[in-house]
């Protein structure tokens, strides 16, 4: 995709996707970094690769997660949830019925499975800070 950007009456082409660099990262709010990191390790298969004022979690072929403690003064990312219940990201599962049953047995808050016709089936789960993750199957 090429975008035309004008600045001071000068137009030039920019190939927008080629300008992007780096790894795709999701910043997630957390009340307690250790608790949230352990939750993502246990229920989503992430591994903590850095512990400090923020935690970095990684899983092969998944986007990198950065956990930031809500109210942190050492990191510029701040969160204003404003009652927003949108999902923060999506993961896939070959057997969402079995995965959902496992989560329910572990006490993870999950929604019912929704059948979206040709788009498949999905449900949502909540992490310890209330972030929603869609599980698609």
Image: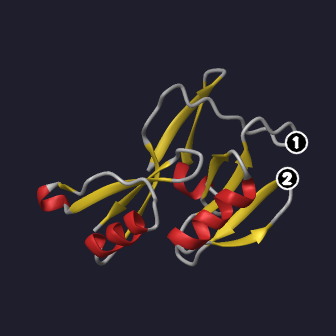
Q: Residues within 10 Å of mark 2 (few under 14, many from 20)?
A: some
Lower sequence index among marks 1 and 2: 2
Residue 60 percent across, percent down from the top left: 57, 78
Residue 82 percent across, percent down from the top left: 53, 25
Q: Is residue 82 left or right of residue 71?
A: left
The residue lying toward the viewer, choosing from 34 and 29, is: 34
Compared with 132, 115 (above or below) is below
Checking the image for residue 53, the label placed there is 2
Residue at 41%, 66% (x, y): give it: 103
Scheme of image coloration: secondary structure
Compared with 59, 108 (above or below) is above
In contact (CB < 8 Å): disc 1 and disc 2: yes
Residue 89 percent across, percent down from the top left: 47, 54
What secondary structure is found at the residue carrying circle 1?
loop
Q: Is residue 28 left or right of residue 33?
A: left
Residue 22 visible, this orientation: no
Q: Which residue is mark 1?
A: 74
Q: Give the position of the C terminus as an image quadrant.
A: bottom left
Residue at 56%, 33% (x, y): give it: 5
**Snapshot quadrant of residue 24:** bottom right
Q: Is residue 75 left or right of residue 66?
A: right
**Cα–Cα gap, marks 1 and 2:** 7 Å
Compared with 32, 76 (above or below) is above
**Snapshot quadrant of residue 134:** bottom left
Residue 106 visible, this orientation: yes
């Amino acid at each position: 995709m090429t975008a035309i950007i004008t600045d001071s009456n000068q137009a030039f082409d920019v190939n927008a996707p080629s300008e992007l660099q780096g790894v795709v990262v999701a910043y997630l709010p957390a009340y307690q970094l250790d608790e949230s990191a352990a939750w993502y390790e246990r229920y989503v298969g992430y591994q903590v690769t850095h512990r400090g004022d923020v935690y970095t979690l990684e899983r092969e072929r998944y986007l990198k997660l950065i956990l930031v403690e809500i109210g942190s003064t050492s990191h510029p990312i701040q969160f204003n949830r404003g009652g927003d219940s949108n999902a923060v990201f999506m993961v896939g599962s070959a057997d969402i019925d079995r995965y959902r049953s496992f989560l329910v047995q572990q006490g993870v808050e999950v929604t019912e499975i929704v059948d979206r016709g040709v788009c498949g089936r999905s449900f949502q789960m909540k992490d310890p800070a209330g972030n929603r993750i869609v599980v698609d199957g």
